[in-house]
Image: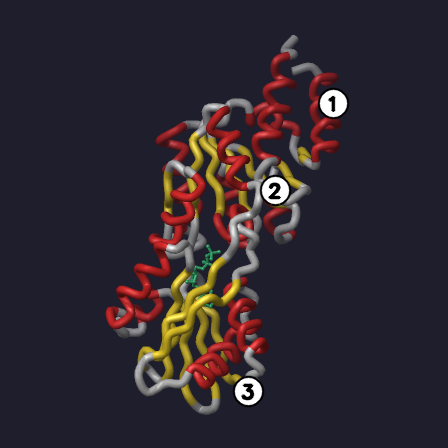
């Protein structure tokens, strides 16, 4: 590409809200074969709501929700905000918390009112030696609806299953159709539950799903997809997306995401929409057509 065509594409990108932080991204993007996308905050709004709460025998909704929300009040995760908002919405007072701990990719734990409370994914419960089979049917239904099932344990007993649901952004489906029309494969990489991830992938026509990955597993997934398909663009918004953004041929951050993701990216999608990805690829193709 000529310096002029790069300047033109960069300027046009700015108008479209696509910020090229590294010149090389413009050259590499048109060669992308696969777009790997983070789920929460990238495909979805990143603002989940609590939709379901089933307590086990011997527990009351108000007590479980108050204790769980008290722990989550100390977490920054979008799931945590959903649970705290629900507790506030039900007028519950959050008891004081001690010894809060966040277990990456698993959940959170603390002492509340002198009892031990753990909240998180099924693998977190299993790691604690708790069986979640009592809620297996409910969990399967919730996951099939694209909701994220979570579990709460109180003093080592399974006390509740909770679901949160994060709406898909209005223009995500169109952006994926656009990428398919450009001949690209689209893969989702997420720490979320497999059933939940697959339900959302089905709704959006996503080709491949890598679910239940720990943050460090995202890079491994990126490398596997690169080996299988060729040049890869990764799109994400979170702190835990930064290594994957760096490992991709082209890292693309959602502009409404975290500073850490933006710093690690080659391209920033200022509008926060996935539509910026096919737009950026189109600009790359146009710029490179003027080779000379
Ligand atoms: P993602 O960004 O894809 O959600 P994370 O690694 O942050 O990936 O979380 C993976 C899973 O760990 C979540 O889907 C959830 O099941 C569990 N988890 C993480 N943080 C929390 C939290 N604060 N409360 C409950 N569950 C959590
Ligand atoms: Mg995210």
Closer mark to the observer between disc 1 and disc 2: 2
The span from disc 1 to disc 3 (Cα, nearest Å) is 56 Å
Q: Residue at x 56, y 38 (%)?
A: 251
Q: On the rendered image, what quadrant is the C terminus found in? A: top right
- Camera-near label (3 vs 2) is 2
74 versus 248 height, above or below: below
Closer to the eye: label 1 or 3: 3
Residue 234 sits above or below residue 77 on the image? above
Ligand 2 within 8 angstroms of badge 2 C-beta: no
Marks 3/2: CA–CA distance: 39 Å
**Rendered image quadrant of residue 148:** bottom left
Mark 3 = which residue? 96
Q: Residue furthest top?
A: 292
Kind of element beneath mark 2: loop
What is the crowding at mark 3: few (fewer than 14 residues within 10 Å), some, or many (at least 20)?
few
Upstream in sequence: badge 3 or badge 2: 3
Q: Earlier in the sequence, mark 1 or mark 2?
A: 1
Q: Is residue 234 above or below residue 123?
A: above
Q: Earlier in the sequence, mark 1 or mark 3?
A: 1
Which residue in the structure is indicated by mark 2?
A: 273
Find residue 99 and report its horizontal and vertical position in percent.
49, 82
Q: What residue did someone put label 1 on?
A: 7
Is disc 2 surrounded by few (<14), some (14 to 19) or many (20+) residues within 10 Å?
many
Q: Are the residues at dot 1 and dot 3 in contact (C-beta closer than 8 Å)?
A: no
Place of residue 94 in the rendered image (x, y in percent of width and height, measured from the top left): 55, 84
Tell me if mark 1 has few (under 14), some (14-19) or many (20+) residues whose alpha carbon lies within 10 angstroms of its own: some
Colour logic: secondary structure
């Amino acid at each position: 590409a000529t310096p002029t065509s790069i300047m033109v594409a960069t300027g046009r990108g700015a108008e479209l809200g696509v910020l090229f932080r590294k010149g090389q991204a413009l050259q590499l993007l048109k060669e992308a074969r696969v777009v790997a996308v983070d789920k929460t905050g990238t495909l979805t709004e990143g603002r989940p709501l609590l939709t379901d709460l089933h307590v086990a025998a011997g527990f009351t909704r108000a007590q479980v929700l108050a204790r769980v929300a008290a722990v989550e009040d100390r977490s920054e995760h979008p799931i945590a905000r959903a649970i705290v908002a629900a507790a506030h919405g039900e007028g519950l007072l959050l008891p004081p918390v001690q010894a809060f701990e966040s277990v990456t990719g698993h959940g959170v734990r603390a002492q509340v009112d002198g009892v031990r409370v753990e909240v998180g994914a099924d693998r977190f419960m299993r790691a604690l030696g708790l069986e979640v089979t009592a809620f297996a049917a409910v969990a399967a239904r919730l996951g099939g609806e694209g909701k994220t099932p979570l579990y709460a344990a109180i003093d080592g007993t399974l006390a509740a299953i909770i679901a949160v649901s994060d709406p898909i952004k209005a223009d995500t489906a169109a952006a994926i159709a656009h990428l398919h029309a450009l001949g690209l494969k689209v893969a989702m990489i997420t720490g979320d539950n497999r059933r939940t991830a697959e339900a959302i992938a089905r709704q959006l026509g996503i080709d491949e799903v890598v679910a239940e990955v720990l943050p460090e597993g995202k890079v491994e997934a990126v490398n596997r997809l690169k080996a299988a398909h060729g040049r890869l663009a990764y799109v994400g918004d979170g702190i835990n997306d930064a290594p994957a953004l760096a490992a991709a041929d082209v890292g693309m951050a959602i502009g409404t995401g975290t500073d850490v993701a933006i710093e690690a990216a080659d391209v920033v999608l200022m509008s926060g929409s996935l539509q910026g990805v096919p737009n950026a690829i189109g600009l790359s193709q146009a710029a490179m057509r003027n080779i000379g």
